[in-house]
Image (spheres, rainbow, N blue to C red):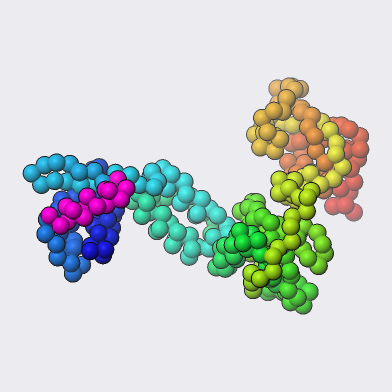
Amino acid sequence: MNSRILLILKYLWEQSDESHTVSIADLSKYLSENGISADRKTIGKNIDALIAFGVDIVKIRRTQNQYFLATRHFEAPEVKMLIDAVQSAKFITPKKSKELIEKLSAFVAPDQTSVLKRHLYVDSRNKAQNETIYIVADSVQTAITENKKITFQYFDYNVNGDQIPRHDGEYYIVSPYDLIWSNDIYYLAGLHEKKGIVAKFRVDRIKNLEISDEIAIEKPSDYSVAEFFSQEFSMFDGEDCKVTLLCENALMNSMVDRFGTDISPEIVDEGHFKITVDVDLSSLFYGWVFASAGRMKIISPKKAVEGFSAVIQRFIK
């Protein structure tokens, strides 16, 4: 009986929706093809049992009653967005991307699968080739949930593209606190036991990870994942400073992306505006200004102008 009910649910899931109803005869034929015989009354009772269990099956009363599965976990537009995210994510390998997209396609109605054939261009050169990334990420998440330490090796790439373990293959002992996803890269934030500090590690450069039986060291009282992210991943890791920037109008989107919608731009002329924002005078901030290729200029204070000039001089000496 259990296999019969499951097959009925499987058929309704894969073959039915509001536009594609199925009959008892359809279900009987499907069951027969799978080596199970059942009369109309039995199949009807099985459908009633599924409805009683909470499956949203709609019954249309006719000479031959028709049925369809009314509620699914996702609507087609939602699945489209998830598929785009999977295709675009650099840390998901091409092979795994294909597998995930096939699984996601099962969450939409039968007549909508064709619309999931996305025409999104993704530069495959940027897709990861390391199939273990998501396995490592899952293990880290398990360790965080279970409050356990982890051990692993960490590697860098040499000029030949070979993986070279740091510290001659020495195992790191880390109390994991958070997984951070930044610029399509997974990072682990956790207490580096040997150094005694909270550090970040790229998940795609972790090898031979094991979950320890030891309880993780409690997070430092001053640890905040938001502050850690801001310090480690953004331009805010230097001297606090209020800076005025002169920008071309085309950079307004970049300003909003970086500083939010609360900025108060002041129109300078037809092609420029200026804003005053709080930043930290770091190499990351100066690098961000440099990347504008002259479309953005620091106009005050003097120490920020001189700091940027000093960075530029390093490139031409």
Q: Main secondary structure of the magenta part?
A: helix
Left or right, 241 with respect to 248, comes to: right
Q: Residue at x 66, y 30 (%)?
A: 261
Name the foreground residue: 315 vs 206: 206
87 sits left or right of 18 in the view: right
Answer above or below: position of 7 versus 165.
above
Is residue 307 visible from the viewing direction of this image?
A: yes
Q: Nearer the viewer, residue 246 or 103?
A: 103
Give the image quarter of residue 4. bottom left
Quadrant assignment, res 31:
bottom left
Looking at the rendered image, the quarter that the N terminus falls into is bottom left
Residue at 40% in and 58% down: 103
* Residue 155 appears in the picture as rendered: no
Question: Would you say 107 lies left or right of 150 here?
Answer: left
**Magenta span includes 55:** yes
**Coordinates of residue 172 in the picture (x, y in percent):** 74, 70
The residue shown at (75%, 75%) is 170
Q: Which residues are magenta?
A: 41-56
Percent coordinates x, y for residue 178 in the rendering: 66, 55
Could you tell me how many numbered marks the image carries?
0
Q: Position of residue 143 (x, y in %)?
A: 63, 63
Tell me what residue is drawn at x 87 percent, y 32 percent: 300
Is 274 above or below relative to 63?
Answer: above
Q: Is residue 62 above or below residue 180?
A: above
Name the residue nearer the viewer: 9 or 278: 9
